[in-house]
Image: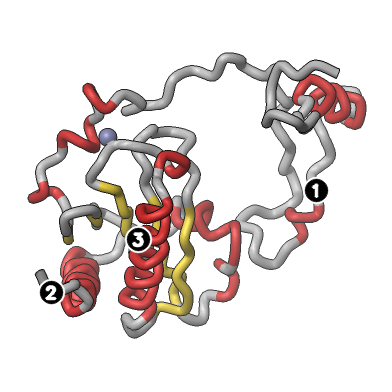
């Protein structure tokens, strides 16, 4: 068998055409799939009644370019350090507002996506994720720190850290990013103090030059 895609020596491939065909065959007469079990989760932000799925659209291949794919024109690369809450030689942490829950974003200083990191960069990213998680988790009122990388909108690697408010177990798990869009903003002084505490913790962990 010949291979046109995938890794050499394997037949691995995700057949998107077949996936879409299966989804459409399983859909109801109006083309919509039935709302799944997730709508019954106690953490799901929306009530099942009246909820309906969008019709699954055709795949768009090749996909449209993301923002900041090209290092030469990347706006994340062009941001001055002053726009970030914390930086070192390799990483920059942003803490923009307003936010409904504490939200931090980690970028590598060098342009690239997750898969572009070499082994040393990957190890360093792991250390940074743990350091930021610890710093944010130590803030009173933070129940858990969620770490996300999606990368569908922007080609410069950026890792999200969301702090789930302690005791708000209704916000547990994958639905919390949806909840964040429906909660009011934190007061500026409260958010500024949280960011300052994270910066102090990260500064305390700097490797001496
Ligand atoms: Zn960039």
Instruction: Give the residue at x 67% y 19%.
Output: 59
Mark closer to the observer (1, 2): 2
Say if mark 2 contacts mark 3, CB within 8 Å: no
The image position of residue 186, as x and y in percent, is 29, 64
Real-space Cα distance between discs 1 and 3? 39 Å
Question: If the image is split into quadrants, where does the N terminus sit?
Answer: top right
Taking the spot 31% from the left edge, 76% from the top edge, the residue there is 135
Label 2 Cα crowd, 10 Å radius (few <14 / some 14-19 / many 20+): few
Q: Where is residue 74 in the image (x, y as percent from the top left)?
A: 25, 28
Left or right for 86, reference 143: left
> What residue sits 32% from the left and 59% below the top?
104
Q: Residue furthest front?
A: 9
Asked whether mark 1 and ligand 1 are closer than 8 Å, the reply comes as: no
Give the residue at mark 2. 208
The yes-or-no answer for disc 2 within 8 Å of ligand 1 is: no
Of the pair 39 and 151, the residue shown nearer to us: 151
Which of the marked residues, 1 or 3, is nearer the chain's N terminus?
1
Report which residue position mark 1 lands on: 36
At which x and y percent is residue 111?
A: 28, 37
User: Toward the viewer: 105 or 175?
Assistant: 105
Q: Using a 10 Å C-alpha cutoff, classify the residue at mark 1 as few (fewer than 14 neighbours), some (14 to 19) or many (20 or more).
A: few
Q: How many labels does the image show?
A: 3
Q: How far apart are marks 2 and 3 (CA)?
A: 16 Å
Give residue 52's position: percent from left, percent from top: 74, 38
Question: In terms of depth relative to the viewer, which is nearer, 139 or 35?
Answer: 139
SS of the residue under disc 2? loop
Which one is in front, 41 or 52? 41
Residue of label 3: 124
Q: Quadrant of residue 163?
A: bottom left
């Amino acid at each position: 068998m010949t291979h046109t895609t995938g890794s050499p020596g394997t037949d691995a491939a995700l057949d998107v055409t077949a996936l879409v065909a299966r989804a459409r065959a399983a859909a109801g007469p109006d083309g919509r799939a039935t709302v799944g079990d997730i709508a019954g989760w106690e953490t799901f932000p929306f009530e099942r009644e009246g909820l309906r799925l969008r019709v699954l659209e055709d795949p768009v291949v090749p996909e449209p370019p993301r923002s900041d794919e090209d290092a030469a024109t990347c706006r994340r690369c062009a941001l001055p350090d002053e726009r970030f809450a914390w930086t070192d030689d390799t990483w920059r942490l942003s803490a923009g507002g307003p936010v409904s829950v504490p939200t931090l974003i980690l970028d590598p200083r060098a342009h690239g996506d997750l898969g572009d990191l070499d082994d040393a960069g990957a190890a360093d990213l792991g250390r940074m994720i743990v350091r930021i998680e610890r710093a944010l988790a130590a803030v009173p009122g933070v129940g858990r720190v969620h770490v996300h990388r999606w990368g569908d909108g922007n080609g410069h690697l950026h890792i999200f850290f969301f702090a789930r408010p302690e005791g708000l177990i209704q916000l547990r798990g994958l639905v919390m990013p949806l909840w964040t869009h429906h909660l009011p903003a934190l007061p500026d002084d409260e958010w500024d103090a949280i960011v300052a505490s994270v910066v102090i913790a990260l500064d305390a962990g700097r490797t001496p030059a």
